[in-house]
Image: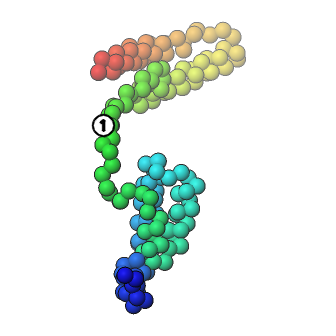
Amino acid sequence: MPRTACEDFAVSTGRELMRVSDADRQAAAERLRAAMGEGRLDLLEYDTRLAAAYAAVTYADLEHLFSDLPAHGSPVAAAAPAVVSHPVPAVRTGFAGLPIALKVLWTIWFGAVLINLTVWLLVSLGNGPEYFWPMWMAVPGVALTGVTAAVTAARSHR
C-alpha cells in the first residue's frame, strides 16, 4: 500500500532532517580519520568524505558518509595482541657517554693543558729552551683517567 505525501513527510521529519552542529561535523571528521587509520579508506576517499562532512547540513548528509563503514565503536575482529618491546638504551662510548661532571672536568683539564703549553712555548721562544714544566699537568690527567675508567666500568655493570 503506497504512502501518502503526508505520511512521507511524517517519516522524513525525524533526526535525518535536523541540522548538524560544528561539533557533529568534527566528530564525523574524527570518525573518518579513524577509518582511514584502520585502512578502511584510502587518502583520496578520506579527503572527499572529509570535505563532505564539513559541508554537511543535516544528519542525513553525515549518515551517508558512513553507510559502508562499521558503526562507530563497534567491535571488529579481535586484533592480534600488541607486542610490547622495551627500548634498549643506546650504548654511547667515548666522550659522549660520560656523565656531565666528567665532561666538565675533562674540558677544564684540556683547557689548562693548552694554556700551560702555550705559555711554556711563548716563554721558550723568548728566552731559549726552558724546563718543560707543563709535564706536571699529566698528574691530574692520570687521576682523571682513573676516575673515568672506574665510572665507565661501574656504569657498564648496571
Residue at left offset 53%, top offset 73% = 55
Q: Residues within 10 Å of mark 1 (few under 14, many from 20)?
A: few
The residue lying at 33 percent from left, 41 percent from top is 79
The front one of 85 and 40 is 40
104 w.r.t. 61: above or below: above
Res 80 seen here: yes
Horizontal arrangement in the rendering, residue 45 relative to residue 60 (left or right): right
Q: Considering the image in quadrants, where does the N terminus appear?
A: bottom left
Given the image, on which type of amino acid does mark 1 rest?
Pro
Quadrant of res 130: top right
The location of residue 9, given as percent across then percent down, is 40, 87
**Split into 4 quadrants, where in the image is the C terminus?**
top left
Mark 1, residue position = 81
The residue shown at (43%, 12%) is: 142
Q: Does residue 18 appear in the picture of this structure?
A: no
Q: How many marks?
A: 1
